């Protein structure tokens, strides 16, 4: 079934490998809290090794083992916020970016969503029934969440985004986008530290899914992308890739599109805990530039 242009734009955006790597990086940066019962030093070193890995395929092959590990840990500690949050992020990574079969993606992201909801419920008792609330009631609960629970809110938001992407053919799923956007905006209000740059990027993507004529807000998206670039000191190359893809192509600004992507290609990919992500961002930048003549 063909769905409307706005929905198709949403689906295409979430099928990009660059976004999958974003989720991978987000998960890996949170690994240390989950495996701390084994060894904080070991888990921190493992996370850093993956983030600085120059062979992306090696990381892709390693992720399923974490899924089984986290499932067993969640079975043992069903109310542990950190473990549930990490499970939500990992299943979102795998389902949204690393699986090509739509049915599998739907199953995996459904578990991500479940873990994300359980994480937020364990962190904040009032947030246990968010799915059935109207928008105003949802906002009231979300805005009551403070900085102590920002990690749980973050994993909840990303897991829901991954689930929506896997079910982008379903208008009921797409109707959840405003709620996810509201939760991401609240995360920014909580001053989330190292989560801020990636949160800005996701808000940029959400606001550039549709042109202004169809209800999108590209200028707000541009603001979020530029803020994310500043917050990362320009070291997170994925933000520029998504800025070019989401905003540059949406408004047919070839000059901006090519400038951003050429900056990505010229940049040093080796940045602390961003090397893996930046290498894949460069791959995406090259592909977007190759298709630019056809697109524009």
Image (cartoon, grey):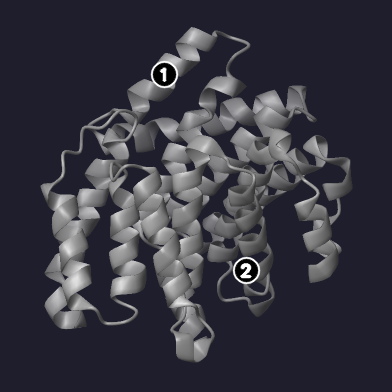
x then y, percent, for residue 67:
55, 33
Give the residue pinned by disc 1: 46
Q: What is the C-alpha distance between the residues marked 2 and 1?
A: 34 Å
Dot 2 or dot 1, earlier in sequence: 1
x then y, percent, for residue 32:
53, 21
Q: Secondary structure at mark 2?
A: helix
Give the residue pinned by disc 2: 177
Residue 234 is tagged as none
The residue located at (41%, 55%) in the rendering is 227
Q: Residues within 10 Å of mark 2 (few under 14, many from 20)?
A: some
The residue located at (14%, 51%) in the rendering is 265
Q: Residues within 10 Å of mark 1 (few under 14, many from 20)?
A: some
Report whether residue 107 is seen: no
Position of residue 44 relative to residue 103, above or below, is above
Q: Is residue 253 left or right of residue 122?
A: left
Position of residue 103 relative to residue 276, above or below, is below
């Amino acid at each position: 079934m063909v769905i409307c242009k706005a929905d198709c734009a949403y689906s295409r955006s979430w099928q990009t490998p660059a976004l999958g790597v974003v989720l991978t990086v987000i998960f890996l940066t949170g690994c240390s809290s989950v495996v701390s019962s084994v060894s904080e030093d070991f888990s921190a070193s493992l996370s850093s090794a993956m983030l600085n890995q120059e062979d992306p395929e090696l990381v892709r092959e390693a992720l399923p083992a974490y899924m089984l590990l986290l499932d067993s840990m969640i079975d043992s500690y069903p109310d542990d916020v950190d473990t549930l949050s990490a499970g939500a992020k990992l299943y979102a990574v795998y389902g949204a970016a690393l699986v090509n079969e739509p049915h599998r993606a739907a199953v995996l992201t459904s578990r991500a969503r479940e873990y994300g909801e359980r994480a937020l419920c364990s962190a904040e008792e009032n947030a246990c029934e968010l799915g059935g609330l109207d928008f105003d009631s949802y906002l009231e609960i979300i805005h009551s969440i403070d900085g102590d629970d920002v990690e749980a809110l973050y994993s909840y938001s990303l897991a829901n985004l991954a689930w929506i992407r896997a079910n982008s053919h379903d208008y009921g799923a797409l109707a959840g986008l405003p709620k996810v956007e509201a939760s991401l905006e609240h995360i920014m209000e909580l001053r989330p530290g190292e989560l801020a740059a990636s949160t800005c990027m996701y808000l940029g993507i959400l606001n550039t899914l549709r042109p202004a004529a169809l209800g999108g807000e590209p200028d707000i998206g541009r603001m979020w992308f530029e803020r994310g670039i500043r917050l990362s000191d320009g070291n997170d190359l994925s933000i520029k890739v998504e800025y070019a893809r989401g905003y540059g192509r949406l408004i047919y600004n070839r000059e901006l599109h090519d400038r951003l992507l050429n900056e990505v290609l010229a940049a040093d990919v080796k940045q602390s805990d961003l090397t893996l992500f930046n290498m894949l961002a460069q791959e995406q930048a090259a592909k977007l530039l190759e298709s630019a003549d056809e697109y524009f």
